Image (cartoon, coloured by chain):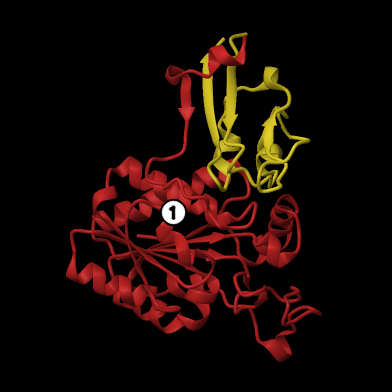
């Protein structure tokens, strides 16, 4: 099955840890980091990068436009 | 496949719009304002109208909207954004003019300006963010607060006998002959966000075609005012706000 492979890059400085991307991800790729950023928020990151399909759902719902999405056809 | 192989310029599918500034938004985590700002920026970017768009910022949380989008802005007094937008559009008819207002601005103090601008059929886009409370000042009861909904000035829930009934201003405006496109959307899921973007695009296109007033209401969350996490606020909105404020087009001419 030709499945798309994706990856996200999160602007961890700007992320406010609202967790909306984590909820929006259909393949449960995103998790919140144990560490906090300078503002004290647990920023989002790829916890399970293998599952990412590059659907851009996380980037669509991100209120602070922190997420950049890349996608390749595997 | 390694992430480094995927993260390359040629594989890019989504990045922050160039119309958005690099300034960090002052909104609380998970605020719908950020999403709607982003959608307006993307629509302006895709339509190539950045140079000729003028926004009218409200009073409320979105008062600093002029810091976040690389377009021309005019700040209006509380509730007077439709009146200011009218003036801007009439003097500069070639520009794309939109007002961006919350429910305390559009449906409370600015009701008169809103209704008359829509009734005159001013050729502007109005973006209406409805979260049911006055978010900026500490979550007080607004005209749009739901029956039984708790707010800081009605801690036991809104009681219509004492506090009046919630106002469906969008339905009211849809009846006016001046409005051409009146719609209600939300941003609780990625699919809903994409629909809202389409509605905003259509509203701006209506303005290009000189069709009259377009109003896009976005039913929003205020996680700080509602005292919930952003994800819970979305669920609460789906459960409580949507039955009273149903999504969809109210008017499309």
Q: Secondary structure at mark 1?
A: loop
Q: Is residue B65 above or below residue B163?
A: above
Q: Residue at x 69, y 87 (%)?
A: B163
- Residue at 42% x, 18% y is B10
* Residue B214 pos. (x, y %): 37, 62
Q: Residue furthest right?
A: B156
Q: Position of residue B73 (x, y in %)?
A: 33, 62
Q: B75 or A26: nearer the eye?
A: B75
Q: Toward the viewer: B228 or B69?
A: B69
Quadrant location of residue A54?
Answer: top right
Relative vertical location of residue B135 with respect to residue B155 in this rendering, above or below: above
Estimate the x, y position of residue B178 in percent, counting from the top left: 32, 72
Q: Is residue A24 left or right of B92 when viewed as pictured?
A: right
Q: Position of residue B102 (x, y in %)?
A: 52, 68
Q: Is residue A74 left or right of residue B198?
A: right
Which residue ends up furthest to the bottom in the rendered image? B162
Which residue has dot 1 on it? B68
Quadrant holding the C terminus of chain B: bottom left
Q: Between residue A60 and residue B174, name the one nearer to us.
A: A60
Q: Any idea which chain is the yellow one in this picture?
A: A
Subunit of label 1:
B
Image quadrant occupied by the N terminus of chain B: top right
Q: Residue at x 77, y 78 (%)?
A: B157
The residue at 68%/45% (across/down) is: A17
Q: Which chain is red?
A: B
Which quadrant would residue B247 be assigned to in this image? bottom right
């Amino acid at each position: 099955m030709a499945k798309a492979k994706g990856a996200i890059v999160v602007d961890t400085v700007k992320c406010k840890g609202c967790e909306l991307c984590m909820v929006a991800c259909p393949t449960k790729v995103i998790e919140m980091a144990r560490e906090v950023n300078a503002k004290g928020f647990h920023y989002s990151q790829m916890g399970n990068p293998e599952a990412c399909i590059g659907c851009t759902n996380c980037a669509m719902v991100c209120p602070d436009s922190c997420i950049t999405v890349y996608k390749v056809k595997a | 496949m390694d992430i480094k192989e995927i993260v390359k310029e040629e594989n890019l599918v989504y990045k922050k719009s160039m119309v958005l500034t690099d300034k960090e938004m002052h909104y609380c985590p998970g605020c719908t304002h950020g999403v709607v700002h982003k959608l307006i920026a993307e629509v302006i970017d895709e339509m190539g109208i950045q140079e000729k768009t003028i926004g009218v910022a409200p009073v409320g949380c979105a008062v600093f909207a002029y810091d976040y989008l690389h377009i021309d802005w005019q700040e209006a007094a509380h509730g007077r954004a439709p009146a200011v937008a009218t003036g801007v559009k009439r003097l500069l008819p070639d520009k794309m003019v939109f007002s961006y207002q919350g429910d305390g601005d559009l449906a409370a103090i600015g009701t008169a300006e809103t209704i008359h601008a829509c009734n005159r059929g001013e050729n502007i886009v109005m973006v209406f963010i409805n979260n049911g409370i006055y978010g900026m000042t500490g979550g007080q009861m607004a005209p749009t607060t739901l029956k039984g909904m708790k707010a800081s000035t009605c801690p036991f829930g809104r009681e219509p006998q004492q506090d009046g009934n919630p106002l469906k201003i969008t339905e009211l405006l849809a009846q006016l002959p001046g409005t051409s496109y009146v719609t209600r959307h939300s941003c609780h899921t990625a699919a809903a966000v994409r629909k809202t973007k389409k509605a905003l695009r259509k509203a701006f296109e209506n303005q290009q075609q000189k069709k009259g007033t377009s109003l896009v209401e976005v039913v929003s969350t205020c996680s700080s005012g509602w005292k919930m996490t952003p994800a819970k606020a979305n669920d609460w909105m789906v459960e409580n706000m949507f039955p009273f404020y149903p999504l969809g087009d109210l008017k499309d001419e």
